[in-house]
Amino acid sequence: MDGEEEDEIVSLSPHLPDAVFFGISLACVIVSQVVAYLMSPHWPDTIAACAGLAIGIQWLAFVPSTLLSTEQYFNATGASTYFALALISLLAGGTFYVRQLLVTLLVLLWAVRLGVFLYVRVVRAGKDGRFDEIKHHRAKFFSLWAVQGLGIFLGALPVLCLNSTPQDTASARWSAQWSDYCGMACAGGGLVTEVIADNQKAAFREIPGNEGRWISSGLWAYSRHPNYFGEICFWSGIFLLCSSALSGLQWLSVVSPLFVAVVISQVSGVPVLEARGKQRWGSEVAYQEYLQHTPVLVPRLTSRKASECWSSVPKPTQCARRDVPEGLSESLMEKDTKPKEPCVVAVAEDQ
């Protein structure tokens, strides 16, 4: 999940038999329970229940969504499910160590902010164009909700493992290890980055003259997808905060930030948006320069600003003198219009 406006749903061909889509839904249930079994010392337990709940909530929301042929509940349901899993796992675990409370609170804040943002965006737009075809194909639409449920369960896995930690495990308490400091920096910084990037893009879209254009200001001057970068940082930080309480196969919950990173960078996030951007603006010189000087995901703090600075500097091929006295004003230099000796002026370029 993310706040990118043009994010895309990875879809299967609607021409496949309905049985294929129902099979995908069943596979999501099986995979989630297998993962829960590996994470749980006494399966079935809280983690297994949360695995079932993650997909069950999606299917409950699917009923009114398919009856009304609407996609407006999809993103809000996803964020609400993260909220429910974090809170239910904390209450079911019966322990309320500082680490558990902190991690749960961070996830709750992230889920509320993202859910409200995405829901308001869809309501204002009137629809989410990603679902124009999918929502009219019930079997396919049904499987998409199951896939979202599995993704949410995998994303929340470190939190579920932490909150289900037995009461006699002291590692669930706050111990201020190096991983805690790194985790706080990643999670906090990632959340702030995601919020700022989403708000900057929303404000950019509100300006009538920007309709149909790409944003290259604010955080978007340093990364083409800063909100995605923020989301990856957030879940990496959550895993680090949970890591000291993990044991045995629970370390496999590292799949959470890896899953988020792979989906965003290789599946339904960056590749789709990059392809769409090149299709829309690939022939424009300004967009080509933006692609050249701005990293895809990980920000490079000097890239775009440096390119903007150097693009405004004139690049003469001749000058009046090879040696110009220090302090000579530009106005005096401009008066000397007769070239006496050719020289090459080298202008630094963005690396």
Image: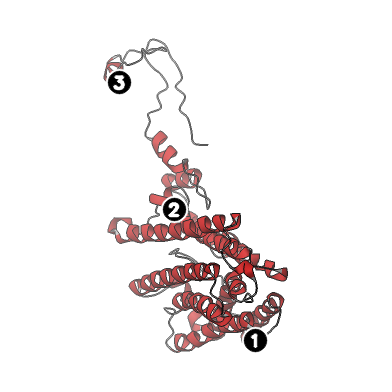
Compared with 72, 178 (above or below) is above
- Element under label 1? helix
Query: Mark 1 packing: few (<14 Cα in 10 Å), some, or many (20+)?
Result: few
Most extreme residue toward the top is: 340
Residue type at mark 3: give it. Answer: Glu
- Which numbered tag is attached to residue 281? 2
Query: Does the image show residue 274?
Result: no
Q: Residue at x 33, y 12 (%)?
A: 338
For the residues labelled 3 and 1, the Cα–Cα distance comes to: 75 Å
Residue type at mark 1: give it. Answer: Ala
Q: Position of residue 323 (x, y in %)?
A: 41, 12
Give the side of residue 327 with respect to residue 75, left or right.
left
Compared with 219, 329 (above or below) is above
- Element under label 3? helix
Quadrant of residue 35 within the rendered picture = bottom right
- Which numbered tag is attached to residue 259? none
